[in-house]
Image (tube, grey):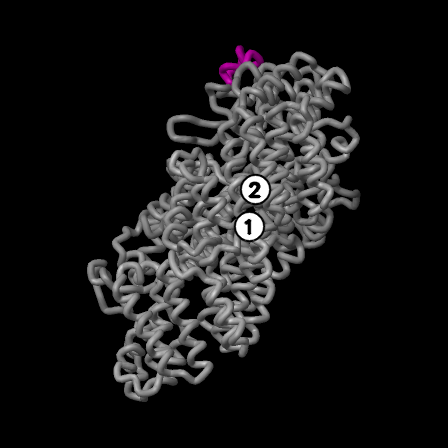
Amino acid sequence: MVLDGGPEAGPGSLVGRDAQLAVLSRWFDRAAAGHAARVLVGGDAGVGKTALVDAFVAGLPDAVVVRVEADGDRRPGAFQELVAAELGADRARDPTSLLERLGARQEEGPVVIVLHDLHDVDEESAIGLARTVRRLHADRVLVVATARGDGLGRVWTSLFADGPDAATLRLGGLDPDGVRELVFRLRPGRWSRAVTSRLHAETEGNPLHLTTLLRELPDDVLRGDSPLPAPRALADEIASRTARLSDDAHRVLACLVVLARPAGRSLLARLTELADVDVDAAARELTAAGLVDVLALGARSTMRVRHPLVRASVYDRLDPLWRREIHLDLAAAVGGTAELAHRVAAAEGRPDPGLADDLEAAARSEPTDVRAAATRLLDAADLSPTAELAERRLLAACVLLVDAYDTDRLLARAPAVRAARPCPERDVALGFLLSRDADPAAHAHLESALEAADGDPEVRALAGVRLALEHIFRGRGVAAAAAAARVPELTRRPVRAEQALVLHALGRALSEGPDAGLDVLAGHVDHALGADPAITEGTLHLAAGRIAAARSRLEEGIARSRRGAPSSSTHRAHCHLVEVLYRTGRWDLAEAQADIALTWFVDGDRGWAESTAHAVAALVPAARGQRDRAAEHCAAARASLERTFNPQGAHALALAEATLCRALGDADGMARALRRVPATAAAGGMSSAPFAPWRPLHAEALVGSGDLAGARAALRSWPRTGAPLWFRLARHQVQARLALATGDTAAAEITLRAAVATAERHPDEVADECPVELAEIRVLLGGLPHVPDGPEQLRAAAAVFTEIAATPWLDRIRAASTPAEADHGDAGAPPLTPRERQVADLVARGLTSREAAEVLWVTPKAVDFHLGNVFAKLGISSRRQLRGRTFA
């Protein structure tokens, strides 16, 4: 953007940016062809980021342009609400709602979402929008964003990192030819190349600086030898331009720069400062001066200061007393939370006991928005008349920052917290910070806060929750349960009591096994306020080997979270749902869920759980024998564990590595991967359940590595009754492998036929929970010598393994089959991609495009795109023809 709006106001007048426009056009063409993309335009203030993007979208007449500009509102989720409103989404913080609207808008044409000034976006919105944008794949959507080049957070930096779907376009000054073109456009005449080269050198091609010089300086100065005004002189030039304004225009400009966001006519009309001002005439004058833009929004118009440099220059030069009066005037006009912000700005850091009291009262009135309440208390601390009051309010704010997990703001105040008087609030803040750094001293501070008999009960309750979490991270189940059990009697907040309930259950599960944790949750899940009780119950059912119950609860928890229920465990739900889908033979859906799970960690968020996400993401490629992909995830899981160890991640990694070794036929490797698991389970905890999924895998490893006595001992330790069907089939398989290891093929056949007979009595349960276990048994049975129905058993197994692309098992089937029997696929049909199989499987089960999109966390448009490919490859034309087919 330029100061006067002339040279870069539209696509026909933008100069020196042909190369950048071409880059954006190439990304648009890619997106328009159905490959979603995202581009960040970064650069210094005044370099023309907004002008470039506005000129680009102005040249896209057939595109649907959704333009959102950050207005500096730092409330959590504020920017995401603006984006949702522009898209027409009814649930701003639900990614599936945003994705649904993005899918609908694509029916009108390719969609370009323009997000201006990412550096002013609140962190919660950044995280939420980044996760949503990453879910755009086969969509006609291009996201184009602008941001200043300095201090952009890791969320945006990661999202726009150069890659096949993203790029960061760093916008510098105009090149010499661009400067020359701009000079001739603004000041037609005879300009030598020496003059334009000097202008380029001294302005570094900055369009704002260059335009200002061309607008204000006479020809002889531009052609002379004296140094041109440096960029810092822009403020003086803006001040000079401001000084030439009429009094009315100056007053309107002052109100706009103090407001610091676009303003409509109704707001300006409420200001005492402008009571006798002709706002329309002032707007025309300010627009002509290149200081203000008037934006048409339907029947309304909005005024905004044209550029941040203009606002900063005018604001800094306002008389402090007048600036304070305008802030107070605006406080009365805007009301709500913005009123306090203007009163704080008017105070300019001077103690204001009345305002500090009002801020503290406002913080107490916002019990659900803890980040906003913390901001109020931090402002109150700064404005407090005494050091004692300031410290009390600071510590109260820090407690809220702990509750909100607002690490960055808490770290900024860490020195003041350490210097504060000993008290429960200080202990909670220090305990949180130490826990974040994996410092073993964290629990001492948290325990001190919990034990403070004279402390605020709610602060003690938060300490109990944080202490329980600290114990859980370190595998201390008994201590975690004891800390969590004390919280309900301290708190009046139902959400806090529910947090404690979940932690109590996890603590019991860590010390006594998953069923003990389920006992704690019994009767609480169906009427829970948040999503975490359902997610935790699903987690514990999975640890206990009850796969169907685990899936039901995990999906329920995710659905609750998407509807807006509070949750701190949604990332965990996605991780465990990966394992559930893997164990029930829905491998492609498991990979889709792993992709979703990993989006929670791509920006460095929740680093302590990243190891689990990568470990479960390794399961499907490991079982398919995709050594490199599986090894890459396992390596990432190990690296995460080295940074932040947690027992759950270590257990998940052991299972993933054993699964890969199994697919590769490396029994010794299986045994090495699982070597620590039995001792851990024997000590109690999550892995101690009698039907835990690791047990058959470990027993098979013992057989394959030659430890037959160990395998028999493992079998004898398993309960004879109460096992789920999948575990009974796994027991038969281990027994058959033991018999084969001793050369007793007859006993192996008897065992395997018993397993098949058991499965055939429960066909629905097999299809829903354990198709892979039955298929594995059929391969073992069909591979035995002199089995009359061997080919039939192999064909049945091949049908299952072909659908899930289980290459190692298909190779074994081919090895056991005659050449005539070995062809199990349709060589004429192109194979479906993983995403196509995921979509086909969901549609075959009767889901609509919208419902399938919610499961896969993509747009309905993307589902329809992949479904079209499925139809073409399978030679069908309707969803009905998919019914009854399986695609895993």
Q: In this view, does 787 lie above or below 617?
A: below
Q: Which element type, helix, strand or loop, lies under badge 1?
A: strand
Residue at which label 1 appears: 40
Residue 100 percent coordinates (x, y): 36, 45
- Residue at 61% over, 24% down: 457
Task: Locate the C terminus by quadrant.
Answer: bottom left
Task: Locate the N terminus by quadrant.
Answer: top right
Q: What stretch is highlighted in magenta?
A: 268-278
- The CA span between labels 1 and 2 is 9 Å
Is residue 271 a member of the stretch shown in magenta?
Answer: yes
Is residue 326 a member of the stretch shown in magenta?
Answer: no
Which amino acid does the dot numbered 1 rest on?
Leu
Residue at which label 2 appears: 118
Quadrant of res 811: bottom left
Return the residue nearer the eye: 136 or 116.
136
Residue 574 percent coordinates (x, y): 46, 51
Q: Is residue 509 above or below residue 808?
A: above
Which amino acid does the dot numbered 2 rest on?
Leu
Q: Do the residues labelled 1 and 2 touch (CB within 8 Å)?
A: yes
Badge 1 or badge 2: first in the primary sequence: 1
Q: Is residue 696 visible?
A: yes
- Residue at 37% over, 62% down: 726
- Residue at 51% over, 36% down: 501
